Image: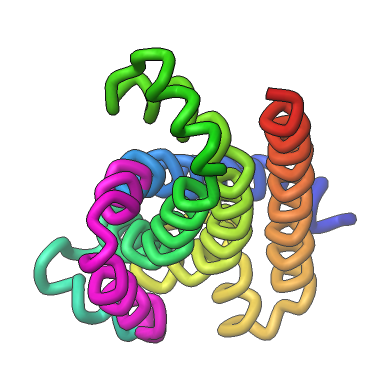
Amino acid sequence: MTYLTENWDVVLRLTWEHLYLTGLVLITAVALAVPLGVVLAHFRRATTPALGLLGVVYTIPSMALFALLIPVTGLGTKTAATALVAYSQYILVRNTVAGLRGVDPAVEEAARGMGMTGWQMLREVRLPLALPVILAGVRVAAVTVIGMASLAAWINAGGLGVLLFQGLYQYHPVKMWTGTVLIGAIALAVNRVLLILETKARHWAGAG
């Protein structure tokens, strides 16, 4: 507690940096993944190779991907965000495709019978019904990103990982514990909020 009371401003700044990086990554990743998932859900033959490629990216060690990007994007938030967005795509695209393909064909047929266009069906029927599965992917991706964002400190991208690395280099267990506890708390809180949204979306889709 002494460390926190004496360095609360530093801890608060690093926490904000961690939240900012995580939020930036998730917003960007979802904005890219959902349209790609919609396209792949329609063009089934492209799904396996596309998910295979994204899966390969997902298996690359984070430090290695950071190192590969540094010559292109340099040190800092840009490189960290680029790598984490790339990591998130596999989870988000996979769940978007699964959610859209899981829509009951009878519901789609009824929508066509009502005279809906393809765009109207996607916007008013398919995406709302697929939302619980998409949110499940967002929840998994969010927790993953929050944890991996701690490694971004290695490339000067800030965040709570700074406390972990400083604690390791300086043999300062309190710093390591502080960083670990805060990262875990953020992950648990975000997971809980998204789980509530996912449950509500599931109930809404079932009622619809």
The N terminus: image quadrant = bottom right
Q: Quadrant of residue 12?
A: top right
Q: Quadrant of residue 58?
A: bottom left
Nearest to the observer: residue 10 or residue 115: 115
Nearest to the observer: residue 97 or residue 170: 97
Residue at (46, 46) in percent of width and height: 100
Colour scheme in the image? Answer: rainbow
- x, y percentage for residue 115? 35, 14
- x, y percentage for residue 47? 29, 66
Q: Is residue 66 visible?
A: no
Number of marks in the image? 0
- x, y percentage for residue 65? 29, 78
Instruction: Write down the region rendered in magenta.
Output: 34-63
Magenta highlight: main SS: helix
Residue at (35, 84) in percent of width and height: 60
Q: Height in image: 180 above or below 125?
A: below
The C terminus: image quadrant = top right
Q: Height in image: 133 above or below 170?
A: above
Q: Residue furthest left?
A: 72
- 194 vs 188, left or right, is left
Residue at (40, 48) in percent of width and height: 25
- 44 vs 111, left or right, is left
Nearest to the observer: residue 78 or residue 55: 55
Q: Height in image: 102 above or below 183?
A: above
- x, y percentage for residue 135? 59, 44
Residue at (46, 33) in percent of width and height: 108
